[in-house]
Image (cartoon, grey):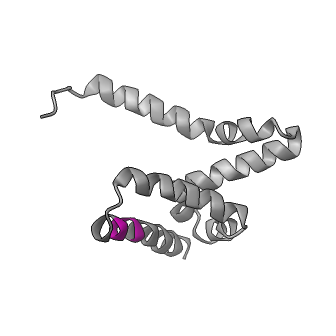
Amino acid sequence: MNYVWAFVVGGAICVVGQLLMDYTKLTPARILTGYVVAGVVLSAVGWYAPLVELAGAGASVPLLGFGHLLAQGVQTAVDELGLPGAFTGGLTAASGGIAASLIFALAAAAVGKSKDQS
């Protein structure tokens, strides 16, 4: 049943993004940043953690999950360090994912062939 909830929730998040691209003039970059900010806001009001518990990776992997991760990292760091944790907590919590994305981007650039865009 966990797989079903992950699929349903993750799919619903993707459907909303696709509908935003199809029926609004929002660019993909604005939708991306909106999803991250929405994840932070939903986490701040306490609505996203129950969704992550229900759907697992279906809710924690998409961009909303990244915003949730940043918010949880800031909250934990502020509890431990005070105000300086607001500046370091998000990056500390997300450092593994950020490092992985940089490493995979470097690997793709090393393997791929560049060409001029026209």
**Where residue 9 sits in the image (x, y, percent)?**
50, 71
Regarding residue 17, the answer to whether it shows in the image is yes
Between 56 and 20, the one lying in front of the other is 20
- Vertical relation: 78 (above or below) 104: below
Query: Residue drawn 55% across and 40% down?
Result: 97
**Where residue 96 sits in the image (x, y, percent)?**
59, 37
**Where residue 1 sits in the image (x, y, percent)?**
54, 76
**Where residue 2 sits in the image (x, y, percent)?**
56, 71
> Residue at the left extreme?
118
Query: Residue drawn 79% across and 38% down?
Result: 85
Res 82 → quadrant: top right
Q: In the picture, which quadrant includes the C terminus? A: top left
- Vertical relation: 85 (above or below) 1: above
Regarding residue 61, the answer to whether it shows in the image is no
Q: Answer with left or right where residue 53 lies relative to residue 30.
A: right
Number of numbered markers: 0
Query: Residue drawn 65% across and 48% down?
Result: 70
Q: Main secondary structure of the magenta part?
A: helix
Span shown in magenta:
16-20
Q: Decide whether residue 118 is among the magenta residues.
A: no
Res 112 → quadrant: top left
Between 54 and 89, the one lying in front of the other is 89
> Residue at the front extreme?
25
Q: Answer with left or right where residue 68 lies relative to residue 11.
A: right
- Vertical relation: 11 (above or below) 90: below
